[in-house]
Amino acid sequence: QVQLVESGGGLVQAGGSLSISCAASGTIVSSNVMSWHRQAPGKQRELVASITSVGSTNYADSVKGRFTISRGNAKSTVLLQMNSLKPEDTAVYYCNLRFPLVGRDYWGQGTQVTVSS
């Protein structure tokens, strides 16, 4: 079984920065994709950024140039550095770990990020 534990998040003023992290534990398949998704009230969950086990990254257009996703020293961790935050970035941010070769994915419990104007 795989568990994802997110940390970080909180309240920040517009223009500020925040970092959130996610640590995976359990049986981790080496070929995997870790990603961050977010869901604002009344909206669908959307992909924010993803990173493969070999370091390839992908970003939503809305966060390109402001957010950076990276793997921690332990490859089972993923970090999201968020700069130049905007009120529209306010959402619950969820970590996801996907094993493409076996078609399984796992979600964290979510962490709230609130950006005040």
Image (tube, helix red, strand yellow):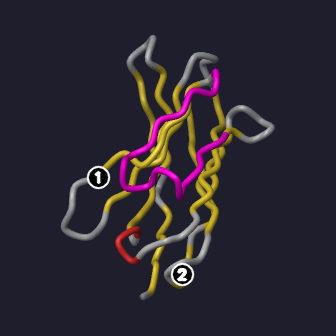
Label placed on residue 11: 2
Q: Nearer the viewer, residue 117 or 37?
A: 117
Is 45 situated left or right of 114 in this image? Answer: left
**Farthest-out residue, front:** 65
Q: Secondary structure at mark 2?
A: strand
Residue at image position (64%, 17%) is: 30
Considering the image in quadrants, where does the C terminus appear?
A: bottom left
Q: Are marks 1 and 2 in contact (CB under 8 Å)?
A: no
Q: Which residue is mark 1?
A: 45
Q: How many marks?
A: 2
On whether residue 49 falls in the magenta region, the answer is no
Q: Give the residue type that dot 1 points to.
A: Arg
Residue at image position (68%, 38%) is: 71
1 or 2: tag closer to the N-terminus: 2
Q: Give the residue type that dot 2 points to.
A: Leu
* Residue 74 screen position, x and y as percent: 77, 36
* Residue 93 screen position, x and y as percent: 45, 59
What's the magenta region? 54-70
* Residue 39 screen position, x and y as percent: 32, 60
Q: Nearer the viewer, residue 47 or 111?
A: 47
Considering the image in quadrants, where does the N terminus appear?
A: top right
